[in-house]
Amino acid sequence: MVAGQQILYAADYGPTDNRIQMEYVVIAGGGGGGNHVGAGGGAGGYRSSVIGEPSGGGAVAETTVGVESGITFTITVGNGGASSVNSPGGTGGTSSLTSDDTSPFAKTIECKGGARGRSGVAQGGGAGFEGGCGSGAIGTNPGGSATTTPVVHGFAGGDATGGNGCGGGGGASAIGTTATPSVAGSGGGGISSSITGSAVARAGGGGGSNGSGLTAGSGRDGGSPGSVPTSPTSAATRSTGGGGGGTHNHNTSGGTGGAGIVILRTTLQATSSTGAPKATGTASGTFVYEFTGSGTLGF
């Protein structure tokens, strides 16, 4: 052995979970868009252990979860944040994955809901709010920050540089864009995952509104667009965790945030479930369970 060289054995890395492993994508509900010169809502937090895919906020994939016969997982899917007249949007609901596993490898995965979009009239402008992904700003202010504990969930909302343009909500893979006096900010991009076998992009931010009547912000990857003075605002796409777009109108609510989703993939077939997950299997023995509402999954 060369002098000073260190040989590492398996024991040096600690115990290894030798059970069958399960990949997950856990996405929280998106934040609702703000009203009356409203900013875009942030996307729901995004956490993933899918091998070869990123997690939210530019993080690498997290570690997978061990499964074996007798373990039951409890799945919570967060609702999208509401939006009401002359007020900020609602914060998106938390999504989570927990189990009754008593081994040393047991863990809980929790994702915070997207930040609510700020309302210009109700709050007089200001910085965006913090959430799984942050919401956009109004006036001359910074976008809201994203949740970073215990792990990063996504990106911040877009800044605003004055006038009636509002920042876009942050997404799982990118910051919401900055608003100028004439052009509102667009939502930050989400993340494309192939955990179900087909690539689907989710957890994009909502667009900001624009009171100058020029260009409103676009929604991204499930997030809905903002509005100009004469246009209503649509809801974000359900089961994507997308942020709701902001609306300029004082008598029209901003876009509702998209509800979240929890997707699980493993080679061990479940023996029971509640909450009516969509279950699919493949010839290779891989089983996928998509929860668009809360429930349980037993093995």
Image (cartoon, rainbow, N blue to C red):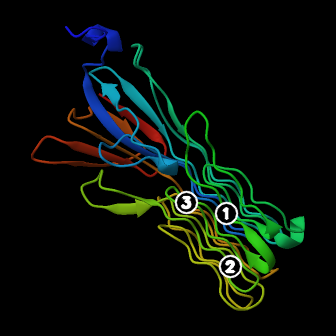
Which of discs 1 and 2 lies nearer the camera? The answer is 2
Left/right placement of residue 149 relative to residue 166 reads left
Tag 1's secondary structure?
Answer: loop
Q: Amino acid at mark 2?
A: Ala
**In the foreground, 276 or 144:** 144
Q: Amino acid at mark 3?
A: Gly
Looking at the image, is 171 positioned above or below residue 50? below
**From mark 2 to mark 3, how far is it between C-alphas?**
16 Å
Looking at the image, is 56 positioned above or below residue 64? below
Tag 3's secondary structure?
Answer: loop
Looking at the rendering, in which quadrant would you find the C terminus? top left
Mark 3 vs 1: CB contact within 8 A: no
Q: Amino acid at mark 1?
A: Gly
Residue 36 in sight here: no
Tag 2's secondary structure?
Answer: loop
Identify the residue position indicated by label 3 in the image.
171
Q: Residue furthest front?
A: 3
Residue 60 pos. (x, y %): 41, 43
For marks 2 and 3, the one nearer the N-term is 3
Looking at the rendering, in which quadrant would you find the N terminus? top left
Residue 23 in sight here: yes
**From mark 3 to mark 1, how far is it between C-alphas?**
14 Å
Name the quadrant containing residue 15: top left
Looking at the image, is 168 positioned above or below residue 17? below
For marks 1 and 2, the one nearer the N-term is 1
Crowding at mark 3 (Cα within 10 Å: few <14, some 14-19, many 20+): many
Left/right placement of residue 296 relative to residue 96 reads left
Identify the residue position indicated by label 1 in the image.
32
